[in-house]
């Protein structure tokens, strides 16, 4: 795969280049090392693309996980305790809600570094959540100070299931949303197939 687009959110490009040049080189190597053609394995059942071979987001994610792992990047989970808010009008939480073990995770962190990386081949809402909520939460916890979000460009997303979002839409929305004082610097990378 290859990086074909970048969007600089709150100065993310400069921060990544100044503070994390070695890690950014590793990320570029990881992206370049993945042969996307190996993951065009999903036969569409959708009406508009019936029988067409598509890229499998799940398999692409596994490929990224394997490559990041080789370079000592790890998934990082934070346990969530749902002790906030209150149940109203005598509502009693079910047994399952009391025994669940919820968490939030950052796809990839590297020991001693505060650069969080997310790879997203999902719906639009997940891209926005990663940058505008999850990365902010992980920053507030002192785990990251900068993020990189890796997403497909439209050309690539067009060969995935309907509903997979893409760089162009995401960058447009971030631009028009603007930056908040709680946002952190994030570099959005738009990738295309090999």
Image: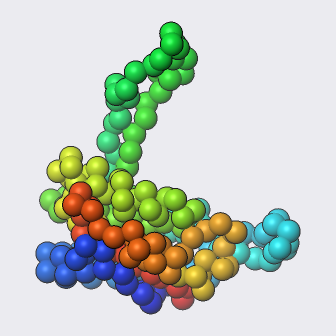
Residue at 29% x, 49% y is 137
52 on left or right of 183: right
View extreme (top): residue: 90
- Measured along the vertical axis of the image, is residue 101 above or below residue 146? above
Instruction: Name the residue nearer the viewer: 20 or 133.
Output: 133
Residue at 54% x, 21% y is 96
Instruction: Name the residue nearer the viewer: 41 or 122.
Output: 122
Instruction: Name the residue nearer the viewer: 10 or 119.
Output: 10
- Measured along the vertical axis of the image, is residue 23 above or below residue 96? below
| Residue 113 % position (x, y) | 17, 63
Residue at 55% x, 85% y is 193
| Residue 162 % position (x, y) | 70, 69
User: Quick check: can you spot residue 63?
Assistant: yes
Residue 189, by quadrant, is bottom left
- Measured along the vertical axis of the image, is residue 137 above or below residue 45? above
Residue 59, by quadrant, is bottom right
Residue at 41% x, 74% y is 176
114 on left or right of 29: left
Quarter of the picture containing the C terminus is: bottom right
């Amino acid at each position: 795969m290859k990086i074909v687009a970048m969007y600089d959110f709150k100065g993310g490009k400069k921060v990544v280049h100044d503070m994390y040049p070695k890690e950014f080189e590793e990320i570029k190597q990881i992206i370049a090392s993945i042969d996307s053609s190996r993951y065009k394995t999903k036969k569409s059942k959708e009406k508009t693309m019936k029988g067409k071979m598509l890229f499998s987001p799940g398999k692409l994610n596994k490929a990224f996980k394997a490559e990041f792992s080789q370079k000592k990047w790890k998934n990082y989970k934070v346990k969530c305790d749902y002790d906030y808010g209150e149940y109203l009008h005598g509502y009693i939480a079910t047994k399952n809600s009391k025994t669940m073990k919820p968490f939030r995770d950052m796809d990839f962190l590297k020991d001693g570094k505060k650069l969080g990386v997310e790879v997203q081949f999902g719906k639009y809402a997940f891209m926005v959540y990663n940058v505008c909520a999850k990365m902010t939460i992980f920053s507030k916890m002192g785990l990251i100070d900068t993020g990189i979000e890796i997403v497909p460009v439209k050309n690539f997303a067009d060969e995935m299931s309907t509903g997979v979002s893409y760089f162009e839409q995401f960058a447009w929305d971030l631009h028009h949303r603007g930056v908040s004082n709680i946002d952190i610097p994030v570099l959005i990378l738009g990738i295309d197939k090999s």
